[in-house]
């Protein structure tokens, strides 16, 4: 198992190399960051001076190599746009992003899994139809629209919750109040996906022979469903969770923008718009790391879910 | 004895009432204030930044030697007085005494020298008063409150440039001890009415009142300190969110008002809306590298086909003004007379000019042709700036009315500027923003800026000469005339077709006071004037 873990960690190297090389090349093709930094009212001479200072006039492969060699030593460089350390910018955003994404994922799971189980146990019932309808309703809502509507209703009309911003860490009351609307915005739409997955997976196992055996042994229905049935459908659910987490890390930009949440998604999109290559590269490395680790965690979780699975 | 006791009692009562009034008034204006920014500053280093929102934010914290009064005249701010030598090559500035930096240190001539040297070393902007343009080549500090600037050539607009927040003053020791890239990122020390407390990237900037501030210019109703105890600048990039926060009363005031919400805000009884002319102007430009535009009649036809009022209504929801010259009313050097020479909306005249120029035949889709060539052109602008995108679409429709086929090519800001600098377009809708007319018109129209900010790509010697004269002549009247003449040529050429000038819209809660004072001055950024704002 340890050997498997080490082998998977080594996968990080080609993943990071591949992703950063592609992103680096595409960013450089997109245009000049110095002109964006300075605006139109600066001479070409000054622009060239800045390019030289930042090494942007060197061949692209030299620039990539320099970045790579610094990166492996833990130096992600300085942002071209805000001229702060890239690591500082990322560290400042990781906490809020982690809060938002994990909480949203938790909300999704807490609603969708019970809904999916109930739907499977009572297929085509009123509850099943209602759960599926509600789930489809949320997944059809664009994040942007959903966020604005929730903000208007709870922040403006009812004045129950703050409209935007981050009020502090999630373990504070103020932090929870500020995080509620963005978490709900991010957490509700994927419910359909998880509900349907759970439902279809549970439908496959709910009438299996071992389930009938458990019932005939006198095991309570809840225990039958949860301990015997649900455990066997955990693998696809955990797989989906593992795929979802890296996406949320870098892809919650719409929610972050609507709620002025200082997360990684906004940092990434802002850096792309400003052609802030070092920041884009830095965030991409983090997302690659999260992706590999999430996938590894998923694979390792399989061994707990299904003891038959072993990695050598 | 009784009478004495009575007097003492009265005295106590009066004193207590007096104390309550004093404390009460301080308390009344000590409340924290919140403002909203639609764009986050890049960094708050006045010497390095070129961004508008950065300049606005740092203007609460940093101060230059001079300020501009409501008549656009330079007035002393950190300076007390100044003297010029006869030949205008030596400026002697006497500093105000007792002005403190936020770290408690008194500002002296040594700090001014260090700040200007840093400014010249780091600024990316073309520095009219810098050594590169025969400006300040030596700075002497004969005593702690006297600074002598030696110029290589006379710079009649020097004070205007020295009133620019980019030339703000910082402590010399702090400059020496702080790496350049940390200034305005990790810390910032100035003499302004507010000090920088915290910057949570992506979220907010927190400023606190600098109680020792007491040297605001005379045109303000107070010399300081600021009325607000703290000022939080919330970063809210999404306009719908910003609008919601304003409507909810969570933002005390903001200049970043979403135009789409203007009517709603104006109708809200809890919000007051004020407007002031901006120095941000939008214009249509013809790329003079294209043969199509060599014939002035084609350019004039375009100018006559464009209806600015419709563009203002459609692109800015009416919250802007039609612009007749390239220099707007919020910019120094604005000349109202340019309205008399600007091209009127006259589509019939546009058509006859095109026909005179040989574009007589009309294709099946209504596009004019000449010798088999269609009068078809590409118009570039910014896809991610709603107003400019809408303006480009409206211009497209207006030009098609006179038989000019326009293909829109919209892209985000960076990509569009890349095309502009590569002269890869026929027409463009652009904006420029500067409060000083002279360098501003030079950015747009001087041939030295072809390839950077002169998107007309046009070299006109008369304009170049007039602009140089308006910058360097020691004769005030001659400078003004030259500047007006340069504006006239730019407009008459129809290479640049002014479209609209923005309006600075301020939305504030009704319990915010000081707006009359703030708006007695016509333009942004607020600089030190923000000290007049407070909440009851």
Image (cartoon, coloured by chain):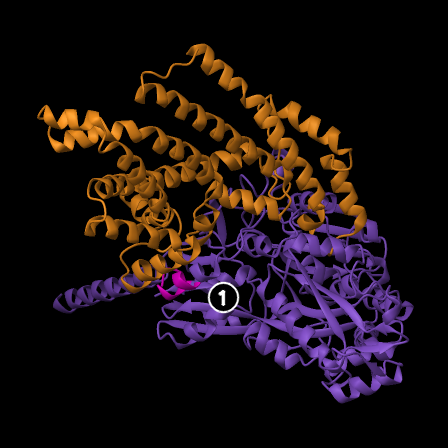
Chain colours: A orange, B purple
The percent position of residue B136, horizontal first and vertical second, equals: 79, 51
SS at mark 1 in the image: loop
Give the farthest residue toward the front: A209
Residue nearest the viewer, comparing B399 with A222: A222
Residue span colored magenta = B243-252
The percent position of residue B262, horizontal first and vertical second, equals: 47, 72
Q: Is residue A11 above or below residue A246?
A: above
Is any atom of residue B324 visible in this view?
A: no
Q: Is residue B309 above or below residue A82?
A: below
Residue nearest the viewer, comparing A191 with A49: A191
Hey, which quadrant is residue A86 in on the image? Answer: top right
Q: Is residue B186 left or right of residue A60?
A: left
**Residue found at x 59% / y 30%:** A76
The quarter of the rendered structure image containing the N terminus of chain B is bottom left
> Does the magenta run of residues contain B244?
yes
Q: Is residue A164 left or right of residue B150?
A: left
Residue nearest the viewer, comparing B218 with B252: B252
Hey, which quadrant is residue A54 in on the image? Answer: top right
The quarter of the rendered structure image containing the C terminus of chain B is bottom left
> Does the magenta run of residues contain B437?
no
Residue at mark 1: B258
Kindly identify which chain the residue marked by label 1 belongs to: B
Q: Callout 1: few (<14), some (14-19), or many (20+) C-alpha neighbours within 10 Å?
A: some
The percent position of residue B440, horizontal first and vertical second, equals: 74, 64
Q: Is residue B25 left or right of residue B38?
A: left
Is any atom of residue B287 visible in this view?
A: yes
């Amino acid at each position: 198992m340890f050997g498997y873990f080490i082998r998977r960690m080594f996968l990080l190297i080609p993943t990071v190399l591949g992703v950063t090389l592609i992103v680096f090349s595409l960013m450089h093709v997109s245009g000049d960051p110095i002109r964006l930094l300075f605006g139109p009212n600066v001479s070409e001479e000054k622009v060239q001076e800045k390019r030289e200072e930042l090494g942007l006039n060197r061949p692209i492969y030299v620039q990539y190599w320099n970045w790579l060699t610094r990166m492996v030593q833990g130096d992600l460089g300085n942002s071209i746009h805000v001229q702060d350390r890239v690591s500082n910018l990322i560290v400042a955003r990781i906490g809020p992003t982690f809060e938002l994404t994990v909480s949203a994922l938790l909300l999704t799971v807490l609603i969708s899994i019970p809904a999916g189980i109930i739907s499977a146990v009572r297929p085509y019932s009123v509850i099943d139809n209602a759960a599926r309808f509600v789930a489809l309703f949320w997944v059809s809502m664009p994040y942007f629209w959903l966020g604005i509507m929730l903000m208007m209703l709870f922040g403006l009309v009812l004045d129950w919750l703050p409209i935007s911003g981050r009020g502090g860490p999630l373990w504070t009351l103020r932090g929870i109040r500020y995080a509620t609307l963005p978490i709900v915005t991010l957490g509700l739409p994927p419910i359909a996906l998880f509900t349907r997955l759970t439902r279809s997976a549970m439908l496959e196992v709910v009438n299996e022979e071992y389930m009938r055996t458990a019932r005939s042994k006198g095991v309570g229905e809840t225990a039958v469903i949860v301990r015997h049935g649900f455990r066997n459908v955990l693998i696809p659910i955990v797989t989906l969770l593992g795929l979802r987490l890296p996406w949320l890390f870098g892809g919650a930009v719409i929610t972050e923008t609507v709620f002025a949440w200082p997360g990684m998604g906004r940092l990434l999109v802002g850096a792309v718009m400003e052609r802030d290559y070092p920041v884009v590269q830095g965030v991409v490395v983090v997302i690659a790391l999260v992706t590999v680790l999430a996938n590894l965690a998923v694979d390792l979780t399989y061994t707990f879910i299904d003891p038959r699975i072993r990695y050598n | 004895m009784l009478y004495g006791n009575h007097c003492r009692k009265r005295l106590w009562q009066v004193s207590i009432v007096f104390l309550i009034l004093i404390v009460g008034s301080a308390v009344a204006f000590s409340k924290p204030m919140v403002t909203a920014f639609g764009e986050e500053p890049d960094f708050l280093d006045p010497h390095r930044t070129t961004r508008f929102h950065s300049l606005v934010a740092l203007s609460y914290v940093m101060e230059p030697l001079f300020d501009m009064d409501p008549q656009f005249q330079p007035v002393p701010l950190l300076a007390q007085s100044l003297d010029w030598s006869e030949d205008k090559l030596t400026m002697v500035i006497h500093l105000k005494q007792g002005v403190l930096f936020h770290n408690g240190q008194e500002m002296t001539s040594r700090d001014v020298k260090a700040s200007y040297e840093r400014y010249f070393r780091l600024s990316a902007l073309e520095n009219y008063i810098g050594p590169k343009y025969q400006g300040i080549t030596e700075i002497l500090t004969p005593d702690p409150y006297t600074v002598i600037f030696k110029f290589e050539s006379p710079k009649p607009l020097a004070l205007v440039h020295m009133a620019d927040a980019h030339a703000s003053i910082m402590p010399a020791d702090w400059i020496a001890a702080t790496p350049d890239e940390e200034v305005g990122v990790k810390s910032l020390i100035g003499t302004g009415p507010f000090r920088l407390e915290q910057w949570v990237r992506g979220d907010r900037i927190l400023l606190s009142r600098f109680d020792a501030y007491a040297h605001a210019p005379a045109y303000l109703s107070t010399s300081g300190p600021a009325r607000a105890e703290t000022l939080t600048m919330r970063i809210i990039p999404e306009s719908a969110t910003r609008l919601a926060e304003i409507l909810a009363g969570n933002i005390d005031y903001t200049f970043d008002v979403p135009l789409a919400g203007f009517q709603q805000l104006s109708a809200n009884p809890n919000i007051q809306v004020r407007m002031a002319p901006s120095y941000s102007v939008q214009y249509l430009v013809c790329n003079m590298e294209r043969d199509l535009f060599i014939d002035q009649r084609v350019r004039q036809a375009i100018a006559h086909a464009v209806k600015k009022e419709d563009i203002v209504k459609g692109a800015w929801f009416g919250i802007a003004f039609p612009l007749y010259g390239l220099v707007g009313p919020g910019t120094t050097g604005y000349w109202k007379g340019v309205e008399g020479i600007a091209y009127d909306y006259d589509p019939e005249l546009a058509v006859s000019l095109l026909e005179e120029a040989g574009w007589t035949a009309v294709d099946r889709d209504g596009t004019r042709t000449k010798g088999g060539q269609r009068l078809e052109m590409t118009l570039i602008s910014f896809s991610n700036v709603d107003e400019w995108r809408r303006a480009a679409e409206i211009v497209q429709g207006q030009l098609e009315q006179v038989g000019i086929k326009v293909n829109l090519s919209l892209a985000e800001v960076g990509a569009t500027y890349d095309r502009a600098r590569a002269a890869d377009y026929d027409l463009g809708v652009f904006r420029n923003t500067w409060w000083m007319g002279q360098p501003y018109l030079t950015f747009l129209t001087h041939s030295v800026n072809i390839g950077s900010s002169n998107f007309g790509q046009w070299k006109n010697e008369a304009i170049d000469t007039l602009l140089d004269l308006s910058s360097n002549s020691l004769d005030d009247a001659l400078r003004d005339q030259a500047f007006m003449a340069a504006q006239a040529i730019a407009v008459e050429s129809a290479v640049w077709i002014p479209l609209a000038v923005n309006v600075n819209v301020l939305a504030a809660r009704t319990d915010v006071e000081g707006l009359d004072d703030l708006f007695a001055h016509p333009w942004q950024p607020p600089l030190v004037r923000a000290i007049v704002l407070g909440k009851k």
